[in-house]
């Protein structure tokens, strides 16, 4: 049996074999005042913003204040030569760190890593939604009630919601999913990006929550269950020996459009 059916591989600067390096440019530079044009795919519009907090480059994913607050935008160009009335401009308030270094396996619609530092949830979350201010949440627990992942008919969900969840799954809207020990996180990109969390222990799922604030099991949660099942199935069949209780996976679309879209340097090595 080949150890790595399909994988990426690259070399780091130290010359040792690492696995995949994409946009590993992490050095911080002094922010330089700029006016940037930002494209918002969800709105199909490009607007100009003032920036004095970040060293921005075309291709960076940013969040702004103003009426497009919370929407992910992409820097189109950066202008350092300007004179503007500050009151006319909204600002860039956050930039997503899309640097990823690690080894990934291609697993159907997704790529999977077992390296906890490659694409951790906290970092990945900013690829989809703006960092939050001090929002306060109340989370209820279902007191250990659980259903088996391999029999979703026992998940308390209506057939209509299950069908919509299945469509989300089939359309690869589960953009990111990770399992860290027994706790799982996922981002589902529906009309908005939603965060789904769950516990997975001994084949059973419990404490499912979704940031769409449904008080019942929703289509986002159902889609995540299907994606989780597919990835665990892939791991079991192909690389069970590498799995030590942690994986992170992202859709190929996210991998290409977010991780690899940033200008920078890196290397990808495909192995068979
Ligand atoms: Zn939901």
Image (cartoon, grey):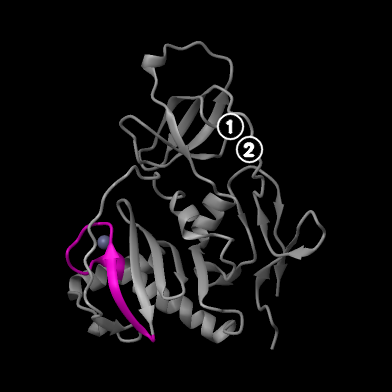
Above-or-below relation of 206 to 136? below
> Which residue: 21% across, 74% down?
142
The 10 Å Cα crowd at callout 2, few under 14, some 14 to 19, many 20 or more, is few
* Residue 256 spot, x, y in % from top left: 56, 54
> Which residue: 39% across, 86% down?
202
Secondary structure at badge 1 equals loop
The 10 Å Cα crowd at callout 1, few under 14, some 14 to 19, many 20 or more, is some
Specify whether residue 215 is painted magenta: yes
Spot the residue most to the right. Answer: 15
Kindly report the distance in space between the C-alpha atoms of the residues bearing marks 1 and 2.
8 Å
Question: Marks 1 and 2: CB-CB under 8 Å?
Answer: yes
> Which residue: 59% across, 67% down?
115
* Residue 133 spot, x, y in % from top left: 34, 42
> Which residue: 41% across, 64% down?
172
31 sits to left or right of 1: left
Numbered mark located on residue 69 in the image: none
* Residue 136 spot, x, y in % from top left: 26, 50
Which segment did they paint magenta? Answer: 202-221
The answer to whether one can see residue 166 in this image is no
Query: Reading the chain from its start, which is encountered first: label 1 or label 2?
Result: 2
Q: Which residue is mark 1?
A: 55
* Residue 145 spot, x, y in % from top left: 23, 81
Q: Which quarter of the rendered picture does the N terminus lie within?
A: bottom right
Q: Quadrant of ligand 1?
A: bottom left
The answer to whether one can see residue 205 in this image is yes
**Along the line of sight, the residue nearer the viewer: 237 or 178:** 178
Above-or-below relation of 110 to 151? above
Specify whether residue 105 is painted magenta: no
Q: Which residue is mark 2?
A: 28
Residue 104 found in image quarter? bottom right
Q: Which quarter of the rendered picture does the C terminus lie within?
A: bottom right
For discs 1 and 2, the disc positioned in front in the rendered view: 2
């Amino acid at each position: 049996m080949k150890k790595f059916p399909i994988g990426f591989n690259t070399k780091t600067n130290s010359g040792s074999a690492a696995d995949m390096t994409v946009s590993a440019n992490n050095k911080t530079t002094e922010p330089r005042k700029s006016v940037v044009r930002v494209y918002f795919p969800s709105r199909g519009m490009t607007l100009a913003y003032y920036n004095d907090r970040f060293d921005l480059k075309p291709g960076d994913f940013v969040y702004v204040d103003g009426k497009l607050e919370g929407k992910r935008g992409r820097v189109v160009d950066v202008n350092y030569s300007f004179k503007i009335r500050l009151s006319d401009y909204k600002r860039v308030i956050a930039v997503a760190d899309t640097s990823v270094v690690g080894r990934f396996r291609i697993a159907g619609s997704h790529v999977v890593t077992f390296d906890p530092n490659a694409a951790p949830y906290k970092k990945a979350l900013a690829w989809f939604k703006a960092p939050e201010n001090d929002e306060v949440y109340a989370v209820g627990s279902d007191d250990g009630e659980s259903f088996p992942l391999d029999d979703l008919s026992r998940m308390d969900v209506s057939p209509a919601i299950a069908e919509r969840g299945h469509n989300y799954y089939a359309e690869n809207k589960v953009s990111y999913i990770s399992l860290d020990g027994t706790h799982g996180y996922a981002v589902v990109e529906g009309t908005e990006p939603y965060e789904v969390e769950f516990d997975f222990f001994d084949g059973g799922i419990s404490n499912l929550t979704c940031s769409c604030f449904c008080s019942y099991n929703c289509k986002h949660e159902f889609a995540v269950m299907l994606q989780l099942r597919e990835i665990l199935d892939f791991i079991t069949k192909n690389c069970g020996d590498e799995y030590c209780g942690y994986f992170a996976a992202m859709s190929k679309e996210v991998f290409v459009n977010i991780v690899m879209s940033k200008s920078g340097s890196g290397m990808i090595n495909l192995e068979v």
